[in-house]
Every structure is written in C-alpha cells, then in structure tokens.
Image: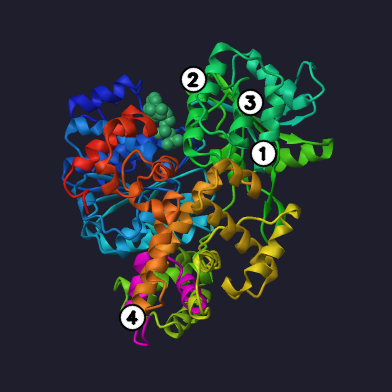
Amino acid sequence: IRDLIRWLPESVIELYEALGIDELYPPQAEAIERGLLDGRNMIISVPTAAGKTLLAELAMLRGALSGKRSLYIVPLRALASEKFESFSRFSKLGLRVGISTGDFEKRDERLGRNDIIIATSEKADSLIRNGASWVRRIGVLVVDEIHLLDSANRGPTLEMTMTKLMHLNPEMQVIGLSATIANGREIADWIKGEIVSSDWRPVRLREGVLLEDRLVFPDGEIQLENRNRDPVLNLVLDTVDQGGQMLIFESTRRNAESMAKKVSGALQESGETIELAERLSGEGKTAKKLAMCLRHGAAFHHAGLLPEQRRLIELGFRQNVVKVIACTPTLAAGLNLPARRVLIRSYKRYEAGLGTRPIPVMEYRQMAGRAGRPGLDPYGESLIMARSESELQKLMDHYVMGEPEDIWSKLASERALRTHVLATIASRFADSVDSLSRLMASTFYARQQDPSYLGETIASVLEFLVRSDMIDKDLTPTPLGALVSRLYIDPLSAMVMIQEIRGIRRPTVLTLLHVITMTPDMELLFVQQSDNWLEDFISEHSSELGNEKNFDWLLREVKTASMLMDWINEVHEDRIEDRYSISPGDLVRIAETAEWLMSALHRISKHMDLGVTYLAERLALRIHYGAGDELLQLLELKGIGRVRARKLYQAGYRSLEDLKAADKSTLSEILGPKIAEGVISQLKEPGVSA
Ligand code: ADP
C-alpha cells in the first residue's frame, strides 16, 4: 500500500498501517487503477466491509492536499456522527472536519471552513436551499449508500441534491458507494464515471437456508444438535458454543422483542452481562424488557429505542458481552456490527398500501452481508428461515442464488416534486420553465425512465404552487414560497397550516397541535382497540380541532396530538409510553418532528398574520423541553430539565431573578450540590440577567 499512497504524509501512512492495512483489497486496487485518485467519477458497488470507506478517505485526502473541499453525504444522522469520529483522526494532518445534522434553516457559512464536511442528504439539500456559499466550491463529493436513490422516501432528495451539486460544481469528482446492485453501470453513466463492481469480500460468506434443524447450503448441509425444541434456539446455542455471535433479523419490532426475550431464556447470566444491564438508562416498559434481555447477553434493537440505549447495545455486542441481537432491518442499513452468524427469520415485510410482500434481494444481501467479522471469523454464515421443503427451494433460488434488483429513481412522485420544484425555483436554480426542464433533464430519472411522465407531474406541481401563492406564473418565488422552501417543509404542509388556522375561530394549544399532525410531514401513531377513549375526546374538543374529513385519519391525528399534549404537560415518559403503546425512541422522534413543524407554523403565522405567532413560538419551546409555559425561563439554564425546573418552581423559584436571590444551600438541597453550583455560575454570566 505504501507505493500507492506515497503522496500521503508519513503520519497518515502509519495510521493506516496501524489499522492493519498493508495491502489493498482487490476491488480497492481496481478502483485506484481506474483512476479514483486521479479525479475520475466512480460508482463502487461492492459488498459490506470490502473497504469502500478507505477509498473514499483516500480520494478526499488526495483532494484536501490540493486544497479541495470534500462533502460526504450519509443517509442517517447516526452514521454522520460515526463518520465524523472516524474522519477526525485526519486532524493530525491539519485537516478540519465538520459535521452538519442540526437545524434545517441555518445557512452554516462556518461549515465551509472545513476541508471535509459530513452531512445527511436532507441537510445537504437544505444547505443548498439556504444559500450557503461554499456548496459552490466542492472538489470531491462522496455519496455513501447511493443505492438509496431507489428509496421512495429519501431517494428523491438524494437525487436532487446530487443533481444540483453537480450542476454547481462541474469539475467536482463524484464518488458513489453502494451495496451490490444490478444496474450500477446506469448510475455510473449518469455521473459520467467508471464502475467498479465486485462480489469480493474480506471474509468468506456461506449463504444457506434454515429448515428446522438443518442448515442447507448450496454445496451440502449440516444437522444441528437437537437440544431445544425450537430450531432458532438450537442455532443460537450452536453459535454461542463456538464462541460466535448472532444477529436475528425480524420483520417487526414486536417480533424482535419477543425473540430477544426467548433467546435470553436460553443464555446464561455473567458478571459482565449484569454490569451491562445496569448501565442501561430509562425506567419505562421498554427499558425494563431490554434490561432483562441484556442480563443474559441478548438484546433487541429497533427504531423505538433511545440513541443511548442503542449505543449501549452496540458497544456490548462489539465487546462480545451481548451474544445475540434480534433486530428490525434498520440495523442492516449502514451500522457496522458484523456477527459470526446471521439469521433472517422473516423475508416478508408489511408495506402500507401494498400488504405483505417479500423483501428485495438487495435487502436480503445487506442483511446476509453482516455475517463474518474481518480478522476474527474464519467465515460468516447467513441463513434465511424456511417453513417447508418447498419454501426452502424457493428461498434458495430466489435469494441465495438470486441476483439483486435494479435501482429505480423515485423522483417522479408528486410529493417529492412538490417540495423539490419549489426549492429549485426558490433558490433561483431555475427561473423559467426552460431552465427547470433543463435541470430536471439532468436527473437520474430522466436518464433512466420516460421523461414525459416527469414532465406531466412537474406541470401539475407548478399549477399547485401557483394556486397556493408560492410562485408566480413566471416562476418567481413569492416571499411565502421562499419561506416554505427555507423551512424545509412540504408546501402542502404549509397550505394545511394556513387553511386550518384560518378556519378556526379561537385556536387553542390543542388546535395548533392537531394542525401540525394534519400535515403530510408528521409521523402519526397507530390506533388500537384500547384507544376507544379517542372518540369521547374528539366530541368533547370538536370546536378546537382542525377540519379533518377522514375519520380514520382524525383518530390517528388526535391520538398523536394528545400524546404531544401529555408531553408538554409534563406527564412522565413512562406513562406516555404505556398510554400510547409506544417506545421511548418514538416519543423523542415524534417530538422532534413536532417541534420543527411548530416552529414552521410560528414563522408562517408571522408572515401571513395568522394570529397564532406567539402561541406557536411558545409551543415549539414547550415541545422542545416537554414542559409547561411557566418553566420556560428556568429551562434556559444548562443542567436544568423539565423535572428539576418543576422542583424549583414548586419551591417558589419561578424566574432567573428569583434564582439569583436564592442562597446556595437551599439550591443545593433542591438540585444537589453539583447542579446547583453549575446554575449559580451560569447566573453570574453577563446576559443571563434579561
Ligand atoms: P465498507 O465501507 O465497504 O463497508 P469499510 O471501509 O468500513 O467497509 O471497511 C471495513 C473494515 O475493513 C474497516 O475496519 C477497515 O479498516 C478494514 N479495511 C479496509 N481496507 C482494508 C485493507 N486493504 N486491508 C485490511 N483492512 C482493511
């Protein structure tokens, strides 16, 4: 490797050598041969752990040494922090690394001082919309998990962000990293680059099917020792006995939780597992269940967990204290947690509107590819579970021996275009139908699919935007359109907010909470049988609610609004969890979305004079803290959350002025000595007196 990276300072070469990298993997060598370090655009489509990140790093370092700034786009916030930590080691070289995941409306000019910037695709999109100047001076663009162009949810944003960045920076090198896909060539043609495509992996992967106690591989089979009536537990015990770890992919959170519980019954406690379980934060139902599993070295992992809970599980797994994780497929999407064995227990997934369907081969491969830890396992094993002999054959043909699907652009959806056409016009990327068409003609969609359909949808979206007064007929943005684009909300959300608030005589806190749940940007809770209280609630509060005509939607919206109401009324998280049958991570996520939409409503109200400006502004803060109005001033202090603020308030300290007059020992009694000291020193800072 030394010969190839001689241009790097000795300190970096040593850094890589210390990681055990002294020879390039074959696909890495191919990428470099094809000109990755000479600025060639490239799609690198190889299995997980085949060393894509190293290639991206080398290209970015090469760029930085000649003064070029790099932007590294990732799909998830958690991945952004992971990359940030990892790239920060280049600071030894004098390189500056920055990360941007937060507030959507910021311009973040300061980020431009960095040599390497990491952002999610949504954040990168919003930086372009808000006119950060450095987005026009990017030398190297890396797009991690570029196969997500195919995702209905996130694909269009990624595609428009790439299209615009390529437009702004014609000389920029574009590197797309991807799992193995069938039509990587098509994406490579779009970015006018090379393709490196390979099935090579650093650890051999044996893929097969599990049927009862048989592990059936294309070239033979193994019979498990029958120690338990449950074949999954037999597989678990077999894996653990060999000193291995296992990931079990389930289709739903509930299945993941009950599987983890079942597995934990078959595993032993140890000092280490107990210690890990005791480090788990949270008191609610989910945390208790998880702690029970952790005590036996098992865990479940899904989007309902808090980030710190997930981090603890991941750490426990890396340290080999957690032996088995039962998870939903989110874990396969990017997190680097390889295991000796992978079991895919369900290959069917429920999709809203489509029913239960088999997962794509590409998704199967991403899960299977988690098997085998480089440097630790001699090989990895992945098994997909069959229930019958005939299913075994089917799974073998379709998944184990099958080819992954093509990637299809999802840009032509009305919802995606509504947002992106407005953003394109508002940030003056296009100032006429002609220039808009030209930009859209350079998307992956236009290259891959029939552009006339795209054209039709754009026309209907333009009509909507004119009708809602966000753009003029000549494609100039109105101030409202510009604002909506900067706020990063769906234009339809803005329309819903304006119409609903105008339609209600005296909007209350509940009105505002309901209105934001009516927007397409909100994630809604599901309604269960035990939620029959909702109908009474609705009839009691009908005059405060927005005008939702679909009753099923109304139930979901009001349930979500009511949960937010409990949150800002300081109901304990554990009670909220029980009452709404959610997990703590759901509350955090939904509250974050609600805060964002409430701040948007505040801004729109101010702009349109809707009369709820002050109410929405305060509510956004209350959602942020999960607390009552009267605590907001106390909550500005660091170290003071909603529980401590309430204690202070009840003790008679209702403002910062009150606190300033308080004596140290009383505060210590209420808050504990450490927090009290922190509060006192903050109160002494100039500017806190206001
Ligand atoms: P990917 O991004 O393709 O999933 P990574 O780039 O994260 O894979 O690489 C997986 C692991 O392999 C990392 O720990 C990395 O340090 C290591 N690695 C990468 N290239 C080499 C190499 N040429 N020799 C040894 N280890 C390598």
Task: State which mark lies toward you, 2 or 3.
Answer: 3
Name the amino acid type tagged 4.
Thr
Q: Which residue is mark 3?
A: 293
Q: Is residue 564 magenta?
A: no
Alpha carbon distance from label 4 to label 3? 55 Å
Alpha carbon distance from label 2 to label 1? 23 Å
* Ligand 1 lies in quarter: top left
Name the amino acid type tagged 2.
Gln
Q: Mark 3 falls on what kind of element? A: helix
Disc 3 within 8 angstroms of ligand 1 (CB): no
Q: Mark 4 falls on what kind of element? A: loop
Colour treatment of the image = rainbow
> 543 left or right of 311?
right
Q: Mark 1 falls on what kind of element? A: loop
Q: Which residue is mark 4?
A: 478
Name the amino acid type tagged 1.
Glu
Alpha carbon distance from label 2 to label 4? 55 Å
Q: Earlier in the sequence, mark 4 or mark 3?
A: 3
Residue 501 shows in the view: yes
Name the amino acid type tagged 3.
Cys
Answer whether labels 1 and 3 touch (C-beta < 8 Å).
Answer: no
